[in-house]
Image (cartoon, rainbow, N blue to C red):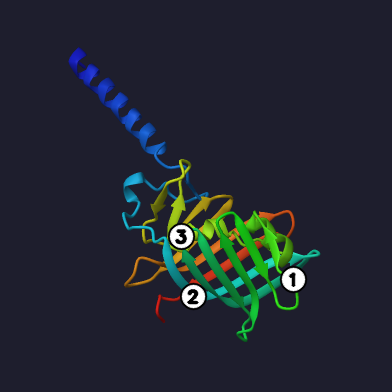
Amino acid sequence: MTQGYRFALRTAACTLSLFLLNACSTFGTRPAPGQPEIHADAFDQRIYQDEISLSGKISVRYEKKGKPEQLPGSFDWDQHGTTLHITLFSPLGQTVARITQEGQRAILEQDGQAPRYAQDLDELLQDRLGWALPVAGLRDWLQGFIRQADGTRRGLPRIDQQIENDGWLLRYASWQQDINLPKRIELNRDTTQAGHVSISIFIQPPGN
């Protein structure tokens, strides 16, 4: 092996190492165990919508006093910038809860109860509903985006995948055919208050 050839190999190895290091540092989200790494170039270039209205089905599994509980139902999601309105419905269409977030102010309204106010909406919902609803994360996840370590949003590729973000294990099981929105999302997390929380979300195409 000539000296020039050995030098070329060392140069190529160093270049490859620097490339891999830079690629790994471009995003702070990591894939779920057993899932391949998502390269920065694989992120979708679609635009995040600050104003969007969505509806769909939701099913929640959690533990209450050591016993499994399941809550099926539906939801409306109406987002306008930092203002957010969420309505949760029972399977029969009755309103279970109305959730409002305006900047740093959050309100939870339930029939027969006085409104509850808080600055931390996720903590308020955990306390009053008995299970975790990660509203802050859902602002991104319902559109197929994830938040990076530097605070920027990146659009996930439209494939069946599992990824960890903000303490939750997310699975994007399917996507809408004609629009850049997920169709089915599975969320899982172990919590102190409600044991293992599993949330299944089916998003209807807007306008349906």
Query: Residue at point 55% right, 56% down?
Result: 103
Q: Which mark identifies residue 81?
A: 3
Mark 3 secondary-structure assignment: loop
Q: Is tag 2's residue or tag 3's residue first in the polypeptide sequence?
A: 2
- In the displayed structure, 61 sits above or below 193; it is below
- In the displayed structure, 68 sits above or below 23; it is below
C-alpha separation, residue under disc 1 versus residue under disc 3:
27 Å
Relative image position of residue 167 (x, y in whole percent): 59, 50
Q: Which mark identifies residue 28?
A: none
Relative image position of residue 84 (x, y in whole percent): 53, 64
Mark 2 secondary-structure assignment: strand
Q: Is residue 116 left or right of residue 39?
A: right
Q: Tell me which corner region of the image, top left, top right, bottom left or bottom right, holds residue 118.
A: bottom right
Check the image and name the residue furthest to the bottom. 92
Query: Residue at point 50% right, 65% down?
Result: 185
Query: Looking at the image, do the residues carrying marks 2 and 3 touch, with CB atoms under 8 Å apart?
Result: no
Quadrant in which the C terminus is drawn: bottom left
Dot 3 alpha-carbon crowd within 10 angstroms: few under 14, some 14 to 19, many 20 or more: few
Query: Looking at the image, do the residues carrying marks 1 and 3 touch, with CB atoms under 8 Å apart?
Result: no
Relative image position of residue 174 (x, y in whole percent): 42, 68
Q: Is tag 1's residue or tag 2's residue first in the polypeptide sequence?
A: 2
Q: Is tag 1's residue or tag 3's residue first in the polypeptide sequence?
A: 3
Residue under label 2 = 55
Q: Is residue 103 left or right of residue 125?
A: left
Residue under label 1 = 114
Quadrant in which the N terminus is drawn: top left
Task: Name which residue type carries label 1.
Answer: Ala
Query: Residue at point 60% right, 74% down?
Result: 88
C-alpha separation, residue under disc 1 versus residue under disc 2:
26 Å
Comparing 61 with 80, the one in front is: 80
Task: Name which residue type carries label 3.
Answer: Gly
Query: Residue at point 46% right, 65% down?
Result: 173
